[in-house]
């Protein structure tokens, strides 16, 4: 059963930790900033640049941030204390996800301001942003839980983040690559941000990605708890 006091305590601690970590905060503004520069410099390709950098923002950023947060907890040995205090994998995930997803969506709202012509459906945009961020947080937490050190965490989180967020951009130029990347949630997020509406295929692919990553996170969390 979920206990609200557990979640609020973790959430408050996460907020304090991230405020003190400038490197993590920068990640939440770097892709909106780059997208703003590109859309202002090359006005005719606004939707393309927004789609590319918004996908990176809602996929790459949550993976790296969540992984970094878990790695920091492990380094300080507070993660072990949290597990020993009876906090479940669901409580821990929800507390971390709420913080990362909300901050990611708040900073990501700037992409809507860049479009200018209202071509992006706001409802689809935010639903894709939330879905992409949640799956990405799960991936980041899997990486942080699995890795033995902060350096190992970064060494795994960054390549994974690049795979899930950069493949959609590369598939724009290579249709053979798109036939593979379309089965990854990152590609579906770019489709949705780029103007496509939710389809049965998009829902199924994102749901399967979510289920697989959720199962992996629960397995790793329980294994880590058993090892301790």
Image (cartoon, rainbow, N blue to C red):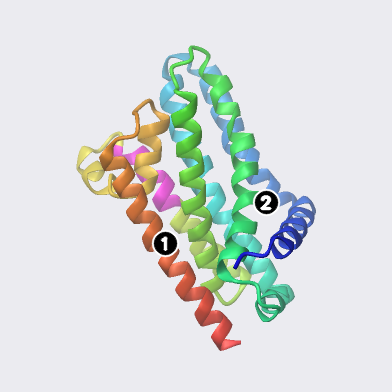
Magenta-drawn stretch contains 142: no
Q: Is residue 108 left or right of residue 80?
A: left
Q: Of the residues tagged 1 and 2, which is closer to the observer?
A: 1
Q: Residue at x 33, y 43 (%)?
A: 203
Number of numbered callouts drawn: 2
Q: Which residue is mark 2?
A: 24
In the picture provided, is 102 more to the left or to the right than 121? right
Q: Could you say which quadrant of the image residue 168 lies in?
A: top left
At mark 2, the secondary structure is helix
Q: Position of residue 122 (x, y in %)?
A: 49, 25
Q: Secondary structure at mark 1?
A: helix
Query: The C terminus lies in which quarter of the figure?
Result: bottom right
Q: Is residue 207 above or below residue 202?
A: below
Question: Mark 1 highlights which residue?
Answer: 213
Q: Please tell me which of labels 1 and 2 falls first in the chain.
A: 2
9 and 79: which is toward the camera: 9
Q: In the image, which disc is placed on residue 102?
A: none
Helix, strand or loop for the magenta stretch, by majority: helix
Q: CA distance from mark 1 to mark 2?
A: 23 Å
Q: Is residue 183 left or right of residue 52?
A: left
Residue 30 x, y percent position in the rendering: 61, 38
Q: Position of residue 208 (x, y in %)?
A: 33, 55
- Residue lying at 49% horizontally and 75% vertically, measured from the top left: 220
Determine the image quadrant of residue 124.
Answer: top left
Q: Which residues are magenta?
A: 162-171
Q: Position of residue 77 (x, y in %)?
A: 72, 77
Residue located farthest toward the bottom when viewing the structure as drawn: 227
Q: Is residue 167 magenta?
A: yes
Question: Image height check: is 173 above or below 143?
Answer: above
Residues packed near mark 2 inside 10 Å, few (<14), some (14 to 19) or many (20 plus): some
């Amino acid at each position: 059963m979920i206990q609200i006091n557990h979640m609020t305590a973790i959430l408050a601690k996460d907020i304090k930790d991230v405020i003190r970590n400038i490197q993590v905060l920068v990640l939440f503004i770097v892709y909106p900033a780059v997208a703003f520069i590109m859309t202002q410099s090359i006005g005719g390709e606004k939707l393309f640049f927004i789609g590319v950098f918004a996908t990176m923002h809602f996929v790459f950023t949550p993976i790296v941030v969540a992984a970094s947060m878990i790695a920091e907890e492990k380094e300080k040995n507070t993660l072990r204390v949290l597990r020993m205090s009876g906090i479940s994998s669901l409580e821990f995930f929800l507390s971390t996800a709420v913080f990362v997803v909300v901050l990611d969506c708040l900073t990501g709202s700037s992409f809507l301001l860049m479009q200018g012509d209202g071509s992006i459906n706001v409802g689809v945009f935010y639903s894709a942003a939330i879905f992409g961020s949640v799956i990405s947080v799960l991936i980041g937490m899997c990486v942080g839980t699995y890795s033995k050190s902060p350096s190992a965490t970064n060494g795994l989180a960054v390549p994974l983040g690049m795979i899930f967020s950069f493949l959609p951009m590369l598939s724009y130029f290579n249709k053979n690559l798109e036939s593979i990347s379309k089965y990854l949630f990152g590609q579906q997020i770019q489709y949705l941000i780029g103007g496509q509406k939710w389809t049965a295929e998009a829902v199924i692919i994102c749901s399967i990605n979510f289920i697989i990553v959720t199962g992996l996170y629960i397995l790793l969390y329980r294994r880590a708890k058993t090892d301790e």
